[in-house]
Amino acid sequence: MKPIRMRLDRHVRQAELLLSEACPSIQYRSRKELLGESTRLGSMRELQGRILEDPLVRRVMASRDEDGWLGSTFHGQGGIESGIRILCDKGVERGQPVLRDALLALERGSDRLSEGIGKVGGVLDDLGLGGSRLIRAVVFAYAGVDDRPLVKEQVAGALERMAAAADVAAVADIAEKYRDKLVFREGVIWPCIYDLRLLAWTRSWRTARHERLVTRGIRRMVELSPIPEIHVRLKSQIIAPASYCMHEFKPRLGSLSPAKWAMWFHRMEMMARLGVVRRVPALTEQVRQLRGMLADGDGLFVLPLRHGYFRNWGAYSGLMLEADWRAGTRRQSDLTFRSLVILAQSGYAA
């Protein structure tokens, strides 16, 4: 992603925390993504070396198989999807040998692509509801790879699903009751969290027409919120699509539980990277409230949030770059950094 230059001197404590006291990943990504510093600087190379010593990074790298695959599965916790997501979020550069080889292993593919998701991944792909092929494309996108045929194919599918969402008048148009659950009507396609991730982390699709299309899709999902949980019906089998973070696009920030805050940070970063925040009033208002919270905290996000969705890294959850939140200002480092990424990608100053 193109770096967005921000000022971090508006609040002295904020700058001190993110650029000096935070973990190497936050320092590195703040300098690279918020300040636009070159990764060639000696200080940045030194931080990159320290990132490679991070305990979680070391654990992921230690899971490397001889062919470059990370972990034993594809989808889920402890596999190549979550491993590459962790390395990229921690700030490991794509040219680092373990990450480079993992991407090559993912490109080659193997029978392990079904592990952790099984036949469900292919079913969801066939139904146009986002399955194994979409997830695989997203993993490439995490590392900034958007020129592979698979990624381009899945970007086209994600745009098609966003266009479909834009034309939905009511949830009843896409869902019907089956036993005690809501299921998608036959032939319906609908965005999942991986569609947002893929479009957020790629650039090749960004034309004025496509950006308007994505904005329309997001605006409609905001208007339909709260969106109930909708399953996929395959004969008599019920399948859960990847709907994490995809139910409430206009929450009241003052009433969010810690778990909902974790979802909000994840979803709002996608909204910011998609470039839709300024175009959708409900999202603009949420960012306005975030700016107010930072101002009240002298530039820091100070709510004492704690939940496994921040701490536990897997296919869906995981936002904590610091080693833990038990000591000092580590929680504030993580949540302030995430807040500033949202503001920067939305085009707002802190």
Image: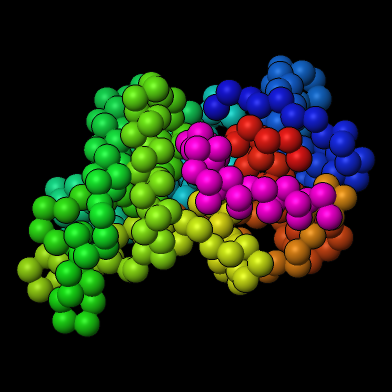
Q: Residue furthest right?
A: 12
- One can see residue 140 in this view: no
Q: Is residue 165 left or right of residue 15?
A: left
Q: Quadrant of residue 123?
A: bottom left
The residue located at (66%, 26%) in the rendering is 4
**Start and end of the magenta stretch?**
272-296
Front residue (pair 177, 292): 292
Q: Is residue 62 left or right of residue 339?
A: left
Q: Quadrant of residue 21?
A: top right
Front residue (pair 287, 38): 287
- Locate residue 253, reporting x and y percent: 62, 63
Q: Is residue 191 left or right of residue 282?
A: left
> Magenta stretch containing residue 273, yes or no?
yes
Q: Main secondary structure of the magenta part?
A: helix
Front residue (pair 62, 121): 121
Q: How is the image coloured?
A: rainbow
> Magenta stretch containing residue 106, yes or no?
no
